[in-house]
Amino acid sequence: MKYLLVGIGNKGEEYAETRHNIGFKVAEKIAEKIEAPFRSSNFGLLAEGKYKGRKVFVLKPDTYVNLSGNAVKFWMQKENIPLENILIITDDLALPFGSLRMKMKGSPAGHNGLKNIEAVLNTNQYARLRFGISAEFKDGQQIDYVLGKWNEEEYSKLPERIEKFSQAALSFVFAGVQNTMSAFNGK
């Protein structure tokens, strides 16, 4: 069985520590846990490894968040990975900081990266792991907020939250989406 875990974010050093790039941070932790180094490949950086006997591809697309769909589709097709074995890891403004929510399907909830993935795949029937970044910004400041850096309090809590999210992603690989939702949602 093959799995594709996609952490979405924006390439470039100027985006590295921003809220919108939390998908990349979780992907990096997953790759570290399965001892799979990233290498430059089609549509981004790819790490290939195994977890409990299952083949795992961890992708950090270089297409920018809003165009992540092409990268997801390319690797799904190239490695013949079924839709139910895809997990998209992304930020979410609607959840409090650090909150974890996995869903089997659903709307993009205003997230342009998820909108693009849905449009390219022509379905919303894929698992997603949402990392709460809260919505602590004034009207008209959303872009600056998501592309902004973490505050000190958030930054101090990030390592523990990234660890929890990487555990949830690997649980998805081994235990499936339903068991993972029961074990991790809201944790």
Image: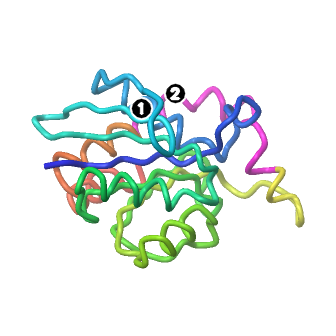
Compared to residue 55, the image places residue 92 above or below, namely below
Q: How would you rate the neighbour count of disc 1 (Cα within 10 Å): few for under 14, some for 14-19, many for 20 or more? A: some
Name the side, left or right, on which 85 lies relative to 169.
left
Q: Is residue 83 above or below residue 7?
A: below
Q: Is residue 177 left or right of residue 18?
A: left
Give neighbour class at mark 2: few <14, some 14-19, many 20+ (Cα, 10 Å): some
Q: Position of residue 73 (x, y in %)?
A: 40, 60
| Residue type indicated by callout 1 | Glu
Q: Secondary structure at mark 2?
A: helix
**Rendered location of residue 154, percent (x, y):** 66, 35
**What residue is shown at x 66% (from left), y 30% (from top)?**
155
Report the magenta residues as a range: 145-164
Q: Position of residue 20 (x, y in %)?
A: 65, 47
| Horizontal relation, residue 96 to residue 6: left or right | right
The reply to whether the magenta stretch includes residue 162 is yes
Q: What residue type is disc 2 on? A: Pro
The answer to which quarter of the image holds residue 96 is bottom right
- Cβ atoms at labels 2 and 1 below 8 Å apart: yes
Q: According to the image, label 1 marks what residue?
A: 163
Asked where in the image residue 53 lies, by quadrant, the reply is top left
Q: Is residue 106 left or right of residue 145?
A: left
- Secondary structure, mark 1, is helix
Q: Position of residue 30 (x, y in %)?
A: 37, 33
Task: Give the dominant element type of the magenta stretch: helix, strand or loop.
Answer: helix
Q: Tell me what residue is drawn at x 57 percent, y 32 percent.
A: 158
Would residue 34 be counted in the magenta stretch?
no
Q: Does residue 131 lie above or below 27 as drawn?
A: below
* Residue plotted at (54% across, 48% down): 8
Which mark is on residue 159? 2
Q: How much space separates mark 2 and mark 1, taking CA atoms?
A: 6 Å
The quarter holding residue 156 reads top right
